[in-house]
Every structure is written in structure tokens, then in C-alpha cells.
Image (cartoon, rainbow, N blue to C red):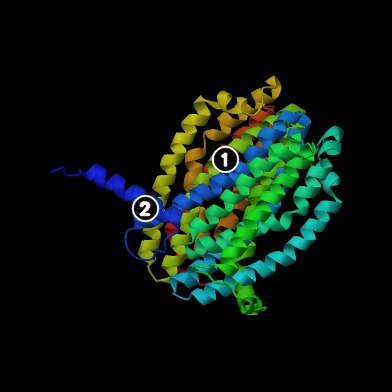
Amino acid sequence: MYQPNQHTTKLSLFFSLVKRSLRGDEHDYTQGSIRQAIVLLAIPMILELSLESVFAVVDIYFVGKLGSDAMQAVGLTESVITIIYTIGFGLSMGATALVARRIGEKNPDAAAHAGAQAIVIALFVTVIISILGVIYGGQILGLMKAAPEVVSQGAVFTRIMLGGSLVIILLFLINGIFRGAGDAAIAMRSLWIASGINIILCPTLINGYGPFPELGLKGAAIATTIGRGVGVAYQCYHLFVAPKTVKIKMPHFNWDWQVISSLVKVSWPAIVQFFIASGSWIVLSRLVAEIGGKDASSGYQIAIRNVVFFILPAWGLSNAAATLVGQNLGAKELERAEKSVLLTMKYNVFFMSMVVLLFVIFPAPIISIFTREPNVHGYAVHALRIIGTGYIFYGIGMVMIQALNGAGDTRTPTWINFFGFWIFQIPLAYLMSKGLGWGTTGAFIAIPVAETGIAIAAWFFFKKGNWKKVVV
């Protein structure tokens, strides 16, 4: 009789867990195998954020066919939109921390109430951003040192993208609610739908297939906004019509100062934290454009899109750590929370090691997918190879930072980001690029150097253990 060996049994168990994670089966993450908990959460979270990165890659791929002016307009707009991502990430982190803690305490109604209050905050915030974006789209590109022809061509793209801020923030926020509840599969599917629609509409509206007119750069913005909007509609269906763990009802939207203050207490440092990080990327984008001109800026934006594409799956693993920390702290399982983070970090380091080899050895073929313009291609290859050297440290830092965030200790990562990016990375980039005369190479080198320092600091504060005492 055939007896399966140990490796066959482990492989069978892994694929069984993958199927369960994609189906979204309910699971208590405060008990049982930590490895299984990580797989059940991480697989859909990795796929979710991989598909979020597809938005950026799809846009730059099709827009790349429109020339370097269009590429720079998209890249600089996305640099500004990182501020919106920052608000979405911050609110999402606050929602994840509170929802996960309430789920760990076995109180799903309080988790739903916290999620509803986070949505209320998001609605107030996005109205202001959308109005400003629609009115000042062209001026925003000008402030980013875009050439006049880039401003002329890209202003409408910027207005549409910033005008659709609501769907960007809600997509991040509601998925944060699902992640906190452990419903990672629903968050994943919402991105599948949004990305799928964007992939179909982007070339259709840019080039004008069938009954659709040729809209050029404007079409890319419309396609992305529609895709995200449909993804949000899917999320709302599972929050209000066919809920699982978190069931939001209309009374949950009644203004609750206590919950609002708890969300703000956790979210505002997270918003500042991500704003610090994204703001530094904006400064570096401006520096590269100022030093190297249009070709360097376009090449840098293509490289960054690829960096983001491969970082977001690792961010998915980090989000799994945040959920496990939040739920286990709620269940008073402090040792289990710490073990979950350390094991997740090991998996992330392994993944990022593979990416380092890919970026260092094969940057030219990767960049050739997006552009073959010699100057743009050269800058992009150079940037990707340099930035890619720090990926292992990116993986360590991301897990440690998200673990602290998931515990509700969003202040510590905020200070780490402030010193790492604004006190160290930006001055270093200016020193090497202008002071030492290294040009764009100096700006590129500053990125992995600063990220390495951030990873070391995050590890230090995680091991101190003060995050275990945070109350949310």
C-alpha cells in the first residue's frame, strides 16, 4: 500500500490552506498553528496588494506608448497621490488595529461599529481633497517641476485622479476593516475586480477601441477611477448586504466621540507616518527631475513602479503580522503575537532575497517591458539596480513597522520614519547628488541606505516590547 511521505503530506496541507484562504473560510487566529494562521492571512493579502500594484504597472505600460511626456505626467501625479494613499493607509491602519482588537476580544458588533466610524471620518476628509485636486490639477504638476508640455498634457489626468480620491481612500480603508476582522479573502477579491476592470478599460479608453473614443491620457485616469469605484461597490456589498464577520448596520454610523477619538488617536500618527514616507518620495522625485531632467524623471518613475510592484506582496505579509498582533493582543496572547511577527519576518526576508537577485541581475529586461527609449531606459535600469540592493532590509523593516502599527503603537513608527526619511534620507540624497556631484546616482543610493537604518531601528523598538502594553 502507498504511504505518502512527509514532504507530500506537508505539500498537501499547504495547498489545502491556500484553498481555504482563497475561499475565505472563518478561522480563529488566536489559537492553533501560527504557520497556518500566517498562510491563511498572508496568501489573500499578498494577492490583494499584488493586484493593487497592477494599477500602477498597467497604467505606466499603456501610457508608456504615449511618450515620455505622458509617462512623466503619470509618474508625478502618482507621487502626489501618495499623499491620498497616505490618508487611506493611515485610516486603514487605525481601523485594522481597532477591529482586530475587538475581534480578538470576541466582540464583532464593536468591531463593526469601529469600522463604520472610520468610514464616516473618510467621507469628511475626501470632500476637501477632491475639490482641491479638481481645481488645482495643473498647478500641482507645475509645483513638481514638470515641463510646460507635460503640464498641458497631464493636467486633466491629475484632476480626474485627485477628483476620485474617495474611491482610493475607501478601497484602502474598507480592506483594512476586512483585514482586521481576518476576512482577507474579501479584501483580495475587491482588488481582483478593480484591477480586472482597469486592465480592460485602460487600453480601451486610451486607444479608443470599438464604440469608445480615443481619450489618450484622460482615458487612463477614467479607467483607473472606474475600476476602483466598482471595487468599493463590491466591498460595500459584503459590509452591508452579505456580511460575514463584520456586519455594519445604520446605527453603527451614529457619531460616537469615544470610538472616533480612539480611531484618531491610532490613525493620525499612522497618517503622519505614511505622509513622512510618501513626502520623502515626492521630494526625491522632484530632486531627480531637477537634476536629470525629463528623461531621468521618466526613468526613475518606471523604476519606482517596479519597486512598488515587488514591495506590495511583501507588504501583504506585513499586514498579516499586523492582524495577528492585533487579534492576539485582544485575546491576551502576548507571546503568540510576538512569535507570529518573527515567523512572518523570516518568510518576508526569503521573498525579498529573491527580488534582490532579480533586480541586480536582470534590471534591463524588466525595464525593456515599459520603455525602449535609450536615455529613459538607462536611468531606469540604473535606479532599479541600486534601489533593489536594499530589499532584504525593506522586508525586515516592513514587518516590524506593521507589527507596531497592528498593536496600535503608531507613534513609534512615525518617529522612526521622521528621522529615517527627513533627517537622514533627504539630506543624504542632496549631499551626494549635489554636494558630492554624483547626480541622480546619489539620490538613488540614499534610498537603500536610509531603508536599512529604518529596519534596524524598527527591530530595536519591536524587541523592547512596549507595544504589548498599548491599549486601544
Tell me: 113 left or right of 465: right
> Residue pushed farthest left?
1
Q: Which residue is mark 2?
A: 17
> Residue pushed farthest top?
374
Q: Position of residue 241 (x, y in %)?
A: 58, 68
The answer for how far apart the CA atoms under marks 2 and 1 are is 25 Å
Q: Nearer the viewer, residue 383 or 185?
A: 185
- The numbered mark at residue 309 is 1
Q: Is residue 197 above or below residue 265?
A: above
Residue 108 visible in the current orientation: yes
Residue 301 visible in the current orientation: no
- Amino acid type, label 2: Leu
Q: Position of residue 150 (x, y in %)?
A: 82, 35
Residue drawn at x 70%, y 36% is 203
Q: Is residue 463 above or below residue 363?
A: below
Residue 151, located in which quarter of the rendered image?
top right
Q: Position of residue 457 (x, y in %)?
A: 51, 50
- The numbered mark at residue 78 is none
- Amino acid type, label 1: Phe
Q: Nearer the viewer, residue 242 or 378?
A: 242
Residue drawn at x 71%, y 58% is 166
- State which quarter of the image contains the N terminus: top left
CA neighbours of label 2 inside 10 A, class few (<14), some (14 to 19), many (20+) = some
Q: Nearer the viewer, residue 359 or 420?
A: 359
